[in-house]
Amino acid sequence: MHPGPYHPPPGAYPPPGAYGSGPYGRNVPRYGHPGGGSRRGGCSCAKVYCCCCCFLFITVVLIIGGAAAAYFIIDPKIPKFSIDSFESKSFGFSDDGGLKSELQATIKAENPNKYLEFIFGEANDPKDNSFKIFYSNLEIGSGTLPIFTLSKKNTTTIKMDLKGELKKDSFAEGSGESLADKLKNNDKVPLLTVAMVPIKFKLSGQEISKGVRFVVNVNTTMNVKNLAQGKNLEISDSKTDIALHINKYAHKLNGKFDFF
């Protein structure tokens, strides 16, 4: 057969598959790699996550570093308290066997801080401002601390009146007679004082304790003489425990509360 327009000679066209395996010998073009786009998206998310973590870590470090620096610069210290005098204006039994007492305490407060100021006595709850004296678990006198501000590097002296009255039947059997004998012979009388003092903090004239309840609790056991003499009380064998209440939590402190 002679070659014609419809019968090309052998070798005129390449054999099937010479230019690919697709239709008409062509391969289907491939664009990218399956899943390639998702891998690129995963890398981007990981980078954003790492950046956020790094930013958060740096922020926390800066906050902690700033707080530590501020703490060492301010150098906060606990105020010091002492009772300069404790006077018995009247303390004794009436004809009906009841006990009446009127005491006055002169308290000295010292602020050793360079930057911090304190406001004492200002409380939302009246229970947070109280000063009570107990004998044999009986409250024999009470009062409240007047509101005052203790400026930085300053010492303030305040007076506090304590009054109380107990009926004869308030005492346990023999307890009233025992106290009467101690007063008559001017013997030592064991007493317990429980003070709740609200406190607020000021830095550079601005209160920094808003919204937080700070109350200093001072409990002192002691022996007292001259209760019935109308003189300054003689206090000995005193032992004091101090705790700081922050909202509903209490933290024991190594503060100083002296009796002179």
Image (tube, helix red, strand yellow):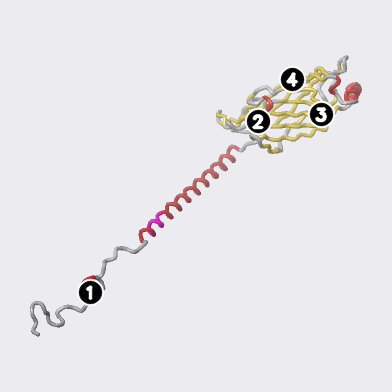
Which quadrant of the view contains residue 119? top right
Task: Tell me how far mark 1 sits from mark 4, CA to CA.
Answer: 111 Å
Q: Amino acid at mark 1?
A: Tyr
Task: Tell me how far mark 2 sits from mark 3, CA to CA.
Answer: 33 Å
Q: Earlier in the sequence, mark 2 or mark 3?
A: 2
Q: Earlier in the sequence, mark 3 or mark 1?
A: 1
The region drawn magenta spans 39-44
Q: Amino acid at mark 4?
A: Asp
Task: Tell me how far mark 4 sits from mark 2, CA to CA.
Answer: 23 Å
Foreground: disc 4 or disc 2: 4
Residue drawn at (80%, 19%) of the image: 165
Of the pair 103 and 34, the residue shown nearer to us: 34
Q: Amino acid at mark 2?
A: Asn
Q: Earlier in the sequence, mark 2 or mark 1?
A: 1
Locate residue 31 relative to residue 189 in the image: left or right: left
Task: Tell me how far mark 2 sits from mark 1, CA to CA.
Answer: 96 Å
- Indicate the secondary structure of the residue bearing disc 3: loop
Circle 2 packing at 10 Å, graded few (<14), some (14-19), many (20+), is many
Locate residue 159 relative to residue 170 in the image: left or right: left
Of the pair 67 and 132, the residue shown nearer to us: 132
Give coordinates of residue 186: x percent, y percent: 89, 23
Foreground: disc 2 or disc 3: 3
